[in-house]
Amino acid sequence: MANEHGSLSINSQNIFPIIKKWLYSDHDIFYRELISNGCDAITKLKKLAMIGEYNEPDDADYKVVVKVNSTDKTIKIIDNGLGMTADEVNQYINQIAFSGAEAFLEKYKDKANDDQI
């Protein structure tokens, strides 16, 4: 399967009032959730390396980076974790507050302890 890369854009003028009113009382919580998702992606990749499903480079440097561009009025949250397949994006992108961790643990439950994610 070839890796596909893409980007997701959200017009913050439209989405943040909805998020603030209906999902999160504070923008900080929303950002924390996005950063947490990046950390989960890294943890999943490390778990795959532990069970032999991923060949981790010796110089692996996992991180979540937050880039703020005040000129463009954008915030980018970037991680170098597991990532998502096109099918996973289609399945989960419209589900707010859904965690793919449960499906991940189910898939690899016989390979290692599931208390690490």
Image: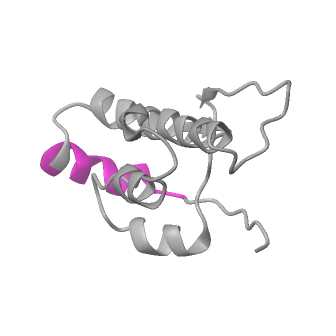
**Picture coordinates of residue 107, whole percent (x, y):** 46, 61
In the displayed structure, 94 sits above or below 98; it is below
Magenta span has 4?
A: no
Give the residue at x 45% y 55%: 104
Identity of the residue drawn at 58% across and 59% down: 84
Q: How many marks?
A: 0
Q: Which residues are magenta?
A: 9-22
Q: Quadrant of residue 58?
A: top right
* Residue 77, position as x, y percentages in the image: 56, 37
> Looking at the picture, does residue 36 appear above or below residue 94?
above
Of residues 24 and 111, which is closer to you in this image? Answer: 111
Q: Residue furthest front?
A: 110
Q: Quadrant of the N terminus?
A: bottom right
Q: Is residue 64 left or right of residue 37?
A: right
Give how far across and how far down residue 117 sits, in percent.
41, 37
Q: Nearer the viewer, residue 80 or 53?
A: 53
User: Residue placed at 51% from the left, 68% from the top?
Assistant: 89
**Magenta span has 20?**
yes
Q: Which of the 4 quarters of the picture holds residue 68?
A: top right
> Magenta span: helix, strand or loop, mainly?
helix
Is residue 59 shown above or below 35?
Answer: above
Residue 66: % across, % down: 58, 28
- Horizontal side of 32 relative to 3 (left or right) equals left
Residue lying furthest right in this view? 58
The one nearer the camera, 49 or 16, is 49
Colour scheme: one colour
Q: Is residue 85 left or right of residue 20?
A: right
Residue drawn at 36 percent across, 34 percent down: 115
| Closer to us: 57 or 110 | 110
